[in-house]
Amino acid sequence: MSSTVGKWYWHIHHDVLAERSTEPIGNRRKYIRENKPGREHETRLRLLKPVKSPKVGRAWAECKKARDIALAEYEKIQGPAPAECVRVRGHALAEYVRGTRLAWAEYVRAHDSASAEYRNVLVAIHAEECLGCPWDGRTIFPEAR
């Protein structure tokens, strides 16, 4: 296993700010040179670099933890509800729908909150580490949109 697998990098893909590498980063560089348009090579290869700050990994771990807790809470309510629905039918179905809607809404709120906090940390670190980067919040090629 390469020492780059699982490490955080800026701009592995043009439309993702930062992500963990799933294969040796040299493979991605080779793929870019062989398969992406020539006019994109310099930008892609220049911006594809390791994230220096450990805050990104910690922020992602916190985000994932918050999402996992929220999903577990949702599943705790969603899981047993169908059996109760079958048992009592009409009343239980209404309760199931009400309960899962509320649980899902809470999951979405927690997920969005954790994701927003993670994005804020990521954007701040990116601004420090990736000077002169054309990232517009969606891509490193904003002129192509």
Image: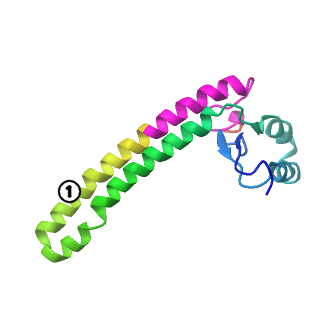
Give the residue type at disc 1: Arg
In x, y percent, where is residue 79?
31, 66
Q: Residues within 10 Å of mark 1 (few under 14, many from 20)?
A: few
Res 143 → quadrant: top right
Observer-nearest of 29 and 53: 53
| Location of the N terminus (image quadrant) | bottom right
Identify the residue position indicated by label 1 in the image.
98
Observer-nearest of 42 and 112: 112
Q: Is residue 137 visible?
A: no
Q: Main secondary structure of the magenta part?
A: helix
**Boundaries of the magenta span:** 114-143
Q: Is residue 118 visible?
A: yes
Q: Is residue 132 magenta?
A: yes
In x, y percent, where is residue 111?
42, 44
Res 51 → quadrant: top right
Secondary element under disc 1, as helix, strand or loop, is: helix
In x, y percent, where is residue 49?
77, 37
Q: Say whether residue 34 is left or right of residue 83.
A: right
Whether residue 44 is situated above or below residue 27 in the rendered picture: above
